[in-house]
Image (cartoon, rainbow, N blue to C red):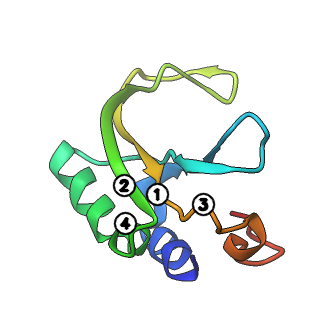
Amino acid sequence: MDAHWQYQLSLGDTILCAGSLRSDDDQTPIGGLPVLDVDSREEAERLFFADPAYQTGLRANVVIRRWNLAIFGGRICDGSTRVAFQAAASLPMSMTRHQLKRSATAPV
């Protein structure tokens, strides 16, 4: 997961926000949801498929959607469209949260 984190951090402001999706137990990772500031679906696909988490099989089943930024941080926004994608996790069932944890300062 270190390579995944480093890759995402290398994208700078291109990732507006991101985080893992969890099952209702709040422990089981079931995917991720980054919101990207990109101009096209093709650019979002290129970034997703270059992510080490995808390349190593930790992410699969990507769904890319346009996202209209209407309210953020309690403020009405300009309504500009961003691209968001949801990637379902394809983690081995035996992998635990502890094994996925990157560090104490940047939880998975």
Q: In this rendering, does residue 60 appear at all?
A: yes
Residue type at the position of mark 4:
Tyr
Task: Name the residue carrying label 1.
Answer: 90
Q: Residue drawn 77% across and 50% down?
A: 27
- Determine the residue located farthest toward the left in the rendered image: 42
Spot occupied by residue 56 in the image (x, y as percentages of width and height): 39, 75
The residue lying toward the viewer, choosing from 61 and 34, is 61
Spot occupied by residue 21 in the image (x, y as percentages of width and height): 61, 44
Quadrant of the snapshot with the C terminus: bottom right
Marks 4 and 2, Cα distance to the nearest angstrom? 6 Å
Marks 4 and 3, Cα distance to the nearest angstrom? 17 Å
Q: Earlier in the sequence, mark 1 or mark 4?
A: 4
- Determine the residue located farthest toward the front in the rendered image: 94
Marks 1 and 2, Cα distance to the nearest angstrom? 6 Å
Would you say 59 lies left or right of 23 here?
A: left
Q: Marks 4 and 2: CB-CB under 8 Å?
A: yes
Task: Name the residue carrying label 2.
Answer: 60
Q: Residue drawn 32% across and 59% down?
A: 48
Q: Nearer the viewer, mark 1 or mark 4?
A: 1
Q: Marks 1 and 2: CB-CB under 8 Å?
A: yes
Task: Name the residue carrying label 3.
Answer: 93
Q: Marks 3 and 1: CB-CB under 8 Å?
A: no
